Image (spheres, coloured by chain):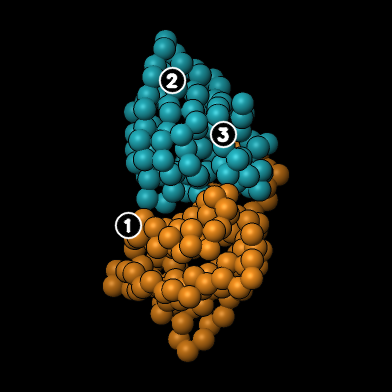
Chain colours: A cyan, B orange
Amino acid sequence: MKIIDAKNGSTLTVALEGRLDTTTAPQLEESMKTKLSGVTELIFDFANLEYISSAGLRILLSMQKIMNHQGSMKITHVNEIVMEVFEVTGFTDILTIE
Amino acid sequence: MKTLTVAAQLKEIETLTDFVNEELENYMCPMKTQMQIAVALDEILANIVHYAYPDNPDGKMSVTVSKKDNKIILVFADNGIPYNPLTHEDPDTTLSAEDRQIGGLGIFLVKKTMDSCDYQYLNGQNILTLTKNF
């Protein structure tokens, strides 16, 4: 999986390419650790994300909890497969998806 | 019908997914179904690694793929600790982010996206059978 960041002021956009699964989720978790300081708007761009498993959901949940305290988070360009995973698990109610 | 045996380790996910996808393509299985099955593979492998072989890096698992009419049948087998993932209580999907528990989501996802899930402990093996219609 590729992680591509773009920072603009206090807005951080993180674009993911590939699969967010058991093996790649730790990579994202590690990479996000140091990036959220001072960020008030976090945007995940899923245009090139093929699919997500529960390991990826766990990270999105913990990111959402952090951003609930320091600003906002949204997820953009979600494909049909990823959207189904969000719907089935009730994550559509937790996350802001555009 | 084809069977692949791999080490029960997370790093085998690519080998496992590639093997299953190749079969699914032979069956002319639609892309959406392939992706749903790929997510299920990830969840089941993670379960086997964590629960069947918690302290055994030498554990092995196999996956068998077959097709009957318009149904894909996936059979996972391992020789680890007897463990039925289907008895795991479903998570409450209505809770807020703050109250959400992180456990149990994976197998819940599998139950929701596959058409049937069945577990047996037979001849010292955990055997999990998933089917998906397409």
Of badges 2 and 3, the one in the foreground is: 3
In whole angstroms, how far apart are the C-alphas of marks 3 and 1? 26 Å
Task: Look at the picture and state if B7 lies above or below A51.
Answer: below
Q: Quadrant of residue A92?
A: top right
- Looking at this view, is A98 or B58 the one in front? A98
User: Would you say B16 lies left or right of A78 here?
Assistant: left
Question: Which mark is on residue A78?
Answer: 3
Going by the numbered disc 3, the residue's amino acid type is Val
x then y, percent, for residue A43: 50, 24
- Looking at this view, is A24 or A60 the one in front? A24
Determine the residue located farthest toward the top in the rendered image: A9
User: In the rendered image, which quarter contains the C terminus of chain A?
Assistant: top right
Q: Residue at x 36, y 40 (%)?
A: A1
Q: Residues within 10 Å of mark 2 (few under 14, many from 20)?
A: many
Chain of the residue where label 3 is placed in the rendered structure = A
Question: Which mark is on residue A12?
Answer: 2
Going by the numbered disc 1, the residue's amino acid type is Lys
Question: Which mark is on residue B11?
Answer: 1
User: Would you say B35 lies left or right of B114 here?
Assistant: left
In this view of the protein, can residue B13 be seen by the observer?
A: no
Chain of the residue where label 1 is placed in the rendered structure = B
Considering the numbered disc 3 on the image, is that residue within a helix, a strand or a loop?
loop
x then y, percent, for residue B114: 62, 61
